[in-house]
Image: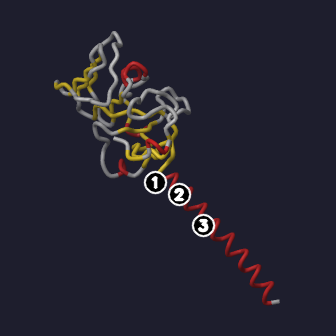
Amino acid sequence: MIKKKSLISFFFEYIFVIAIAIIIAILIRTFIIHPYMIPTSSMEPTILMGDNLLVEKITYRFHSPKVGEIVVFKNPSGSEKQLVKRIIGVSGDHVEITEDGHVILNNKAYEEPYAIYQNVGQSFNFDIQDNTVFVLGDNRGNSQDSRWFGPISKDTIIGRAIFRHWPLNRFGLIK
């Protein structure tokens, strides 16, 4: 009788530990960190199509997004597909994009050693309103970004891309 009770007790303890682990994993994914796979080449050469990233969701609860950070956000078109882009301007900034894709931020040329420029044949000017950010893909000729849909609301930002965990030969922090 004692062995049977011990076996049943062990079984319920095992199930309890598994249930707690699943709950913790769900809470971490929902509130702290989320995996994300890059579906397009709009962020090349920084992030390649097929890269798998970890997106942290805590930072923007304590401070506003900053210029240069790479964020994942809800698609302004309403599509379920989330987008990943780099923040180029924040509330109060004036952003100009030249025909060849270069950025002028608050009347100064903005250095972007990571960007691939292509002539888009059109220049853009934006004044960034409160609670919005202006985002661009690093691959300017192959990116649907704030040039097309305008600045995005900070409320649509899911998190900040911080780490690439796949493929292993590109494993590491994202800058």
Q: Are marks 1 and 2 in contact (CB under 8 Å)?
A: yes
Q: How is the image coloured?
A: secondary structure
Classify 133 as above or below 142. below
Residue type of the residue flagged with mark 1: Ile
Q: Amino acid at mark 2?
A: Leu
The reply, left or right, for residue 137 in relation to residue 124 is right
Q: CA distance from mark 3 to mark 2?
A: 11 Å
Compared with 14, 7 (above or below) is below
Q: Quadrant of the N terminus?
A: bottom right
Question: Which residue corresponds to the image point at 33% horizontal and 39% vertical from the top-left?
Answer: 69
Q: Amino acid at mark 3?
A: Ile
Disc 1 to disc 3, C-alpha distance: 17 Å
Q: Position of residue 48 (x, y in %)?
A: 45, 33
Q: Write the residue at 35% across / 30% down.
A: 135
Q: Quadrant of residue 122?
A: top left
| Residue 164: quarter of image | top left
Q: Position of residue 103 (x, y in %)?
A: 26, 23
- Residue farthest along the bottom direction in this orientation: 2
Mark 1 residue element:
loop
Residue that label 3 marks: 20
Check disc 2 and report the residue beneath it: 27
Dot placed on the residue nearer the N-terminal end, 1 or 3: 3
Residue name at image x 71 percent, y 78 percent: 10
Q: Residue furthest front?
A: 169
Question: Which residue was labeled with disc 1?
Answer: 32
- Mark 2: few/some/many CA within 10 Å (<14, 14-19, 20+): few
Mark 3 neighbour density, 10 Å: few (under 14) some (14–19) many (20 or more): few
- Of labels 3 and 2, earlier in sequence is 3
